Image (cartoon, rainbow, N blue to C red):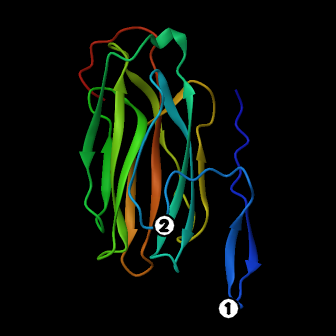
Amino acid sequence: MAFAVQLHCVLKKVDSGKLKPHYFHGEEWINAWRQGFNFQCPHGEALVAIKSYFSEEEGSDRLWSFECQPTPTTLGEPSACWWDDLNLAGMEWTSTCSDNGIVAGVQSQYFPSTLDREWRFYCCRYGKKCPYSCWKTTDIPEYHKEEAEMVVPAYGYFIRGAQTTFSGVLRDRQWKYILCRMTEFDCEFQNL
């Protein structure tokens, strides 16, 4: 299944004369500005696309959108799911799902004192399947304050985690997502 995900935004004038973002119909953001959210894929699905839109006027916050896709039948059903480690707002963070899990959800809370969010991944393990052919994306967004979009490159790739840095000056994050394939057979590795 191919994904043609685009972040659509046009600018329109409001009464004050300032330009404000106006989103095309059909864009479904999971959060409102400066609000927390808890997003989980349906059982047996994994996160495959992440989009966000930045606004300095709205507390240097981002609107977020996520897409899920059913995992291949060769993986079977998830054997366990859990919320993994939490980062602190304003801090760098690297998180890979423990116990060979893949990302199936995201939780976030906004903190006005730092103009940043804390993050946590919802991870699911599929029996004793193990990750392989892992790599990190380039910075997303490429530059702070830009629209951001990440879509897994092909069916059978999964998000295992992310590395993120926070700019205290620009009050925005850049992400490098950790993407892997998963074995179709059971393996003996505890965690990779």
Q: Residue furthest front?
A: 15
SS at circle 1: loop
Above or below — where is 133 with respect to 55?
above
Position in image of residue 178 (x %, y %)? 44, 41
Marker disc for residue 16: 1
Label 2: few (<14), some or many (≥20) within 10 Å? some
Earlier residue among tags 2 and 1: 1
Residue 163 appears left or right of 142: left
In what quadrant of the picture does the C terminus appear?
Answer: top left
Q: Residue furthest bottom?
A: 16
Marker disc for residue 33: 2
User: Which residue is at a point 52% across and 55% down the rendered structure image?
Assistant: 64
User: Which residue is at a point 42% across and 75% down the rendered structure image?
Assistant: 171
Position in image of residue 31 (x %, y %)? 49, 56
Position in image of residue 44 (x %, y %)? 47, 20
User: Which residue is at a point 31% across and 61% down the rendered structure image?
Assistant: 92
Position in image of residue 154 (x %, y %)? 63, 30
Q: Is residue 161 visible?
A: no
The residue type indicated by label 1 comes to Ser
The residue type indicated by label 2 comes to Trp
Label 1: few (<14), some or many (≥20) within 10 Å? few
Above or below — where is 116 with respect to 5?
below
In what quadrant of the picture does the N terminus appear?
Answer: top right
User: Which residue is at a point 51% across and 9% down the rendered structure image?
Assistant: 74
Q: Which residue is at the front of the view, 5 or 164? A: 5
